[in-house]
Image (tube, rainbow, N blue to C red):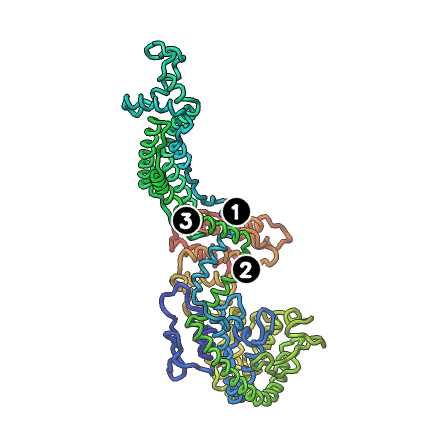
Amino acid sequence: MATILRSLSIGDASLITHRKTLDGKLPPKITLQFANGHPVTFSNGAWSESRPEVLVFDANFIELNVHSGGAVNTNHRKNLLEFALGEPAVAARTAADKATADAKKASEDVQSLSSQLAGYHTGMAFVQFEKLAAVSDADTQLAALQAQIGAARNLNAISAKAVPSIVTEPTFDLESVFSVLRTSLKDVHADAEKVVKEHLGKIGDEAAEGWISQGLQFGDGKSCPYCNQDVEGNDLIKAYQTHFNAAYGELKAKVTALNTTVSTATSATHVTSIVQAVATAAARVSAWAEQVPTDSFVFDPIPAEKALKELEEFLFVLVHQKQGSPSDAAGSPEDLAKAEQLWSAVLTPLKEVNTTIKAASDLIDDYKGKLATANTTTLQQQVLQLESAKRRHQQVVVDLIAKLGIARKAAETAESVKKAEREKLDTLMKATLSKYEKSINTLLKNFGASFSIEGMGANFRGGAARSEYGLLLRGKTVALEGGHPSFATALSEGDKRTLAFAFFVASTLADTKLSTRTVVVDDPMCSLDANRKQHTKAVLKRLHAGAAQLVVLAHDPYFLRDLRDAFLKVDSATPISLFQLVLAANDYTSFGALDIDKECESAYFQHHRVLNAFCDGTPSDSRAVAKAVRPMLEGYLHRRFPGLVSKSLLFGQVVIQIRDAGVPSPLVHAQNLVTELNEINDYAGQFHHDTNPGADTVVVVATELKTYVTRALHIVHRGEAMA
């Protein structure tokens, strides 16, 4: 309620919107009615008009103008000064405030722009950020750096990956093969050779020479190994023995070995091994793809297999020819050139693949070398520099920097104007605050405070104008901030609120327009010592007498009752309205009438009133009436025998105590009630859980209830049981 009226006074809608009902589905709406039925409303987040004639003292006033959490800060002093100066200094204060606000706005504009830019130059001073040049390939460089950083952090895992190696090329010494093919026996006896050649000519088969050479080794030089005829002295046999000598045998052995050499060198397994080795190398290169981009490669086995097969067939023709005539040369230079060409057809594709593999291997080795020496801190700094450069040249940043330059110039101009207006206000403040200090100390004295204020003045330290004052407690100065003793520790909570109330009252009573004001005081006795209650009422009487209207909000009904009585004592015709906040449906709050006298009555009187109203025929809650019978009788006994009946005893135990009392105990005078009290308790006890767990299920019969209520009231009124 106090906040609503404060919001109305200063036109601050946020005070209300910030207090919006948590589960409310509609926006806050308020309607107030002023003199002559004039309505003022709050809807759609705004007041229809502000009413500055409403002055509010509440916790918000204290927190804004005096102290918060036991501390007095710059904002408290600033707000207190504004409140204390009042309307006499409106023009000067308004001009100074406007100049200050303009300077603050200009400064905030600079700060706002700086804050907006702050997110763009994180980790770098703005001066340095502003000078960064544009980088055309920043994204490319960033990607590379990030890859390096990631790799550097995983150095061991990356270094453990296999590096591709070139594929071993198969070898084939064609020169050796053709050396054997070209070898002839020039040193064999010419006559033997002639005879053998003539004989071989008669046979007419190229393989005959080999056959004869092989068969010669099975003879003993005396008889034919085939027909066993005597061959001693046979000129043809002698020619054979001369022709096929040891050199011939060695040559023949070499020719025979050519089969294996050619078969091994032209085996299809060479191509299979190459294909497997190339696949392994390709897999290793692929494993490095994220770190090292390389050229792809592939080995096509079909052309190699074809060339190898053709080479094999070509060489075997020459070998077979040599085997038929070992002593004759075979394989021309042209044949060797052809063989080398076919072998090259096998090796050339592999050499090309190996060139690519070697290039990839070199790149990987170079990368591993750099990775081993990479400094992640340096790399991250480079990343920061590049990212900052990108942000610096975003269009939004370029625009913000341009606006910042304009805002800085505006701030310089506003600061000059502010300085001049403050000097004008300073002169007026000194005269006003001197009078304010005297009024406050008078109030504090009447409140019985053991402290006073001193040196009331104002200054512009830290920006806007603010009040300046000291506290004097038991002859010692108490600092408002810091130091020892301090405001936070030297004053009680009651003292602090008394000081705040004195500030408010001094300014309000000095207001030349008090007669037009509505003064709102929220909980004036909150935290105040009991000995200040009387003067608080006196102060409120002065405010009531001077203001157009006084609204007092409080939690203490007894204080409100006494305040009402004080007002009526001055003028019994004083219009006074009393209301309270009451619980509404769904745990909401509404306004309700307040019977202050009823609110202040004790529990005993309340129970007594409930029973009397029931007997008088006033519509009542029968169960509530039934529950009030026993506590009403308990209250009666406590009041009749003060100090003799323990409050910790149940009603039945109290009756037993009376029954068992002896002279000289005053309780013996109530023994005539024991039977009646027990009978009433037997009835009333069934509605209480302490004696009947099923109390809520007991049916209340109105006629029966009235009988027992009447008997209970008879005891209270006459001190005896009904006859």
Label 1 is placed on what type of residue? Asn
Label 2 is placed on what type of residue? Thr
The label nearer to you, 1 versus 3, is 3
Observer able to see residue 368: yes
Label 1, secondary structure: give it.
helix
- How many neighbours does mark 3 have within 10 angstroms: few (below 14), some (14-19), or many (20 or more)? some
The answer to whether residue 663 is above or below residue 403 is above
Q: Residue 378 shows which numbered tag? A: 2
Which of the pair 450/716 is nearer the observer? 450
**Percent of width and height locating residue 694:** 43, 47
Which of the pair 435/589 is nearer the observer? 435
Q: Is residue 446 left or right of residue 315?
A: right
Which of the pair 511/292 is nearer the observer? 292
Q: Are marks 2 and 1 in contact (CB under 8 Å)?
A: no
- Residue identified by numbered label 3: 356
**Percent of width and height locating residue 549:** 47, 81
The answer to whether residue 524 is above or below residue 377 is below
Q: Are marks 3 and 2 in contact (CB under 8 Å)?
A: no
**Percent of width and height locating residue 279:** 39, 42
- How many neighbours does mark 2 have within 10 angstroms: few (below 14), some (14-19), or many (20 or more)? few
Which residue sits at x=47%, y=73%? 3
Q: Earlier in the sequence, mark 3 or mark 2?
A: 3
The answer to whether residue 698 is above or below residue 443 is above
Which residue sits at x=53%, y=69%? 556
Q: Earlier in the sequence, mark 1 or mark 3?
A: 1
